[in-house]
Structures are given as structure tokens and as C-alpha cells.
Image (tube, rainbow, N blue to C red):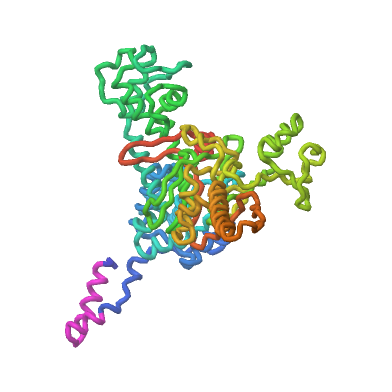
Amino acid sequence: MNKFYLILILIVFSNCKGKSSADSSANASFIDFSFFGNDKIKIDSTLINSSVDENFKAFYKKYNYETAWTTKEHRDFIINEFINAENEGLQPKDYEINKLKSFEEKFDDLPDSLIVKYDFLLTTTSQLYIKHITSGKLNPNELYKDWDLTEKKVDVNKILFDCIDNNDFSDIIEEAKPQHLVYKKLKTSLKILNQMPNEFAGWIDVKEKILPNKKNNFVPIVKKQLMFWGDLKEKDTILSTMYDKKTQEAVKIFQARHGLNPDGIIGKSTIEALNFSRNQRIEQVIVNMERWRWFAKDFGNHYLLINIPDYTIVAIKDNDTMQFQKVVVGKDTRKTPVLESKISNINLNPNWTVPPTILKEDIFPEAEKNKGVFRKKGLVIMNNKNQEINPYSWKKADANKYKYVQKPSRNNSLGSMKINFPNNHSVYLHDTNHRDYFAFTYRSLSSGCVRLEKPLEMAAYILNDTTKWSLKRIQDTTDIKHYFKIQKEKQIAIDKKNAKLLAKNPTLVIEKKKFPKPELKTIVIKVPEDIYVHQLYWTAWENNGILQFREDIYCLDADLYSKLRY
């Protein structure tokens, strides 16, 4: 019987009872119409339980071993989401998009066996997609030895259950994606790049620098590239080989967008950046989107965020930027690790115990040639009883029996301060005795730790205690001159007191007080507040519609893209 007429008969039947219209409405609400539109198909549980995928089995157990994708709206949404997977830097083909579209087009004519097959495919591809958008397609801890990110544990089924049971795919799927501002700006960057024409002005193959107000045959290509990226607006001098003033200003804009020194001189780094095509920049954005899916969903309310390729650190509290500084990071042979941790303490006037890698690769080879290197670098050799060893009695055969320490000093390798946080790589944030490095644009120069441009200001900020640890007190505590000054003031006070005594009794013999030579002592200050550290790596983003790129200092982008597209 036609469903419409059956429903009509039931409604008439219910209204014919001798009750008020209010009673009739109440009774009508109890009528179960579910059997009219119940398109669910019972599935043989052995088909499901034979799977090795626990999420797949749990999904169908929740739905009583019946098909779950009975609502066309749900199917259409997820298929459309897969079609637009490129907006997230993902590939529609990874989610069997052609098979799904083929099933959906013939859905009304499919036999039960194929509807079940289609249902299975929707489930597995949706689970895979949710995993990809929440925690990434690849696992960074399997790709890199020097990445130490907490592996995300995402309940893909819970997200999918919420979508289906609450009939709300749009909001729940969107919420599952990274909510970081940088990730959203990367999506904007990808959109901007995809809307640009796939053009490339030509390869700039020049070894020497292109200097302002000089002619060079590659200047027209430079101008075309600058116009393509929107840094140069003028078009009338495109054929001129003169590196003119307008082009210089455009180059400065281009350099600033790429984290280069905006001096207008077209050198090696600027040429390398100009030689990137639109498609290469798209690939760069896509790999950075993947990285942001790896990073923690929540950085905490208070944290330090280091972008390794940008050589910067920012302190964020309650979504406000509280501190911004330049940093020096590890060179390519001793990369700064990507990690997440929490600050435990700050050391003022730290000792520096030389790590094994630096001993093996730097100190020992020099010491074999000249044992004077230990004193030259301010190193004290200590045995296992903390007794100092004469450096000129040092032998390479016994080298690993000792520890090598730089005592506190503004000029030791850690400078005046270091910030400790638990990690598997023995790295920390610290001051440096190479403060001139911060004037460089390229600052991939350390042995793995992150060096701070204004370390004492950062210490004062983190400690946040103007009574005990004001910036002035921190500065005094780490300055040997301060202790000499105090000693001098004490001596003056003693001399005044002695002068008064001698005035009363000229024959009085007063023994001259001897002060020990001032020295800096290490002070460890616990950080009670929960302040997290995120040392991360990203080379692309967008700022107010302007694309920003940084040099891939550890050469990770191209390799990651090939793995994502494998």
C-alpha cells in the first residue's frame, strides 16, 4: 500500500476517537512512524568482525550491525568534503572519491549487497579523513629522530558518531580541524595561490649580485617575478635591464616577505627565493598545513612559541603577545629539535657542561693539537671526584673519564642565563657569548639549543616577580661588576669606621680585612607557573593577505611533500 495513504488512514483513525483536539495531538505524538522510512539494512556481523580495524568494528557495533549512512544529506556532505579535501592540503583520491560518487549516483537502484559495500566505504574513508584532519596523514615521530611531539590520540568514531547522531556534520567536522590561527591563514594562502595563474617568468641564473642602479640581463625576469607576486606594481619598464629605484623598492618588499634582509641587493638568498614557482609555493603551504595537524591542538594559556626557520620566539599569554625576540637556532648538522614541554626552572649564572657531541666533534680534535684549547675556551677538566685536572696532563685515551665545565661568566657559552624544560634532547633556551649573531639574517648557527636575543628580559618576564626578581636584580645578579661594587662599598664603610677609631686612638693596630675575590654563583629558580614551550617548524603563512615564506633551513619541505603525495 502507498505509504502516503497508510499515513492518512492512521491520522484519520486517531482523530476519530472521542477526545479533544489537544488529547488527539498528544496521542499522535506517540505514534511510531519509524517503520515507514527505515532504510537500514541488517549486516551479517561476521563480515564486520572479520576486519582487523578496531574502529571499523566498533562503529558497526554501535549501530547494531546495520547500515549507518541512510541519510542522503550525510552522504552528500561527506562526499563533498572529500571533493574539497584539497582545501585542507589533502587529496580527494585518498578517500576513494570516484567510487563513492559512482555508488551515490546509482544509490536508488543498488541491491542490498552493494548498499552495504557503499556503507562500509563511507565509514572507512570518513574515519581515515577524520584521522588526517585531526592528527595528520603522517606520523612525525616516525619520520624524524629529532622531533618529539606528543602523539595525538583522537577518537575518530566519537567524532563520526557525533556527526551522525546529532545530524551536524558541518560544525563538528570543522571543529575537528586545527583551530590555530596559522593553520587558518595557511588555508587562505593555499586559496590565494590556487587562484593565481600557473606562470613562471624564467630561471634567474646569475652568480654575482645584482646591485642597485646597475644593468643586468636578468633584471627583466626579476621584474616579471616581482609583478607576478604583487610586489612590483609598475609595468612600463619591464624590458629595461636597469635595476632602477622602483624595482629596488619592490625587491625590499619581496625580501621582507621572505625573512631576508631588505637591503635591495639581489644576492644568493634573494635569487633562490625568486626562483620559486607558484606550484613550489603551493607544495610548501601544503606541507606546513600537515605540520600544523601534528602540533598540539591546545598550546595552553601561557606559552613560548619558537618558529625555528623564522628565528623568532614569542611569549603568548591569554592570546596576547607579551614578548617578541630574535633567536639563534641549530645549524643543519645539529638541528634544533621540534618539541613540546613545560618550563621547570631558570638558572642564573649557569655552569656549562660541554655535551658529548661538541666534545667529540670540536674540543677533542683541537685538544689533540694544542692542549691550551681548554684554557682558551675557559674549560675546567673535572674527574669523577670533582677534582680539577691539569689540562696539560690530559690524554685522548682518558678523555671520556672526565667532564668539561665552563664556570659561570657572561662569556661562557650559555652566557648569564638558561631556561630548562624536560626533553629527550638535552636542549634549553639560553643567553650566548656570541651576541653579534643577532645582527645576522641567517641565524642557523648554534649547536642545537635556542639562543635568546634578550635573555634577562625573558627571565624577568617568566619569573614575573618584581619584588624578588625584578629585571634590575637579575641584571645585578649576573654581573660580576656588581659584586666588585658591593665589595668596594663594604671596604669604604670599613675604612670610614677604622678612620674614626684611629682618630680616637692613633696607636690602635687594625688588621686589614681581606675579601675573597668575587665570583658568580649559579642560582636555580623554580618557575611555579605553568608556562609551556613549543619549538616548532613552519616555513609559510599569510599575514593580512600577504604571503610569507621562510627558507627551509633543514631542507624538510620537498621530502615531506613527496611522502604526502606518495
Does residue 351 lie above or below 68 as drawn?
above
Location of residue 177 in the rendering, given as x and y in whole percent from the top left corner: 41, 52
Location of residue 479 in the rendering, given as x and y in whole percent from the top left corner: 54, 47
Residue 73 lies in what quarter of the image? Answer: bottom left
Return the residue found at the far left: 21
Q: Residue at x 39, y 15 (%)?
A: 218
Q: Along the horizontal axis of the image, is 542 left or right of 67? A: left
Does residue 326 lie above or below 221 as drawn?
below
Q: Along the horizontal axis of the image, is 422 left or right of 102? A: right
Does residue 276 lie above or below 465 as drawn?
above
Of 399 and 157, which appears nearest the observer?
399
Location of residue 9 in the rendering, given as x and y in whole percent from the top left corner: 23, 74
Specify the principal SS of the magenta part.
helix
- 20 falls in the magenta region: yes
Stretch in magenta: 4-27
Residue 275 lies in what quarter of the image? Answer: top left
Q: Residue at x 36, y 48 (%)?
A: 80
Q: Quarter of the image containing the N terminus? A: bottom left
Of 415 and 58, which appears nearest the observer?
415
Does residue 378 lie above or below 65 as drawn?
above
Of 375 and 294, which appears nearest the observer?
375
Q: Is residue 294 visible?
A: no
Q: Residue at x 64, y 53 (%)?
A: 515
Location of residue 393 in the rendering, given as x and y in whole percent from the top left corner: 81, 38
- 344 falls in the magenta region: no
Q: Is residue 310 visible?
A: yes
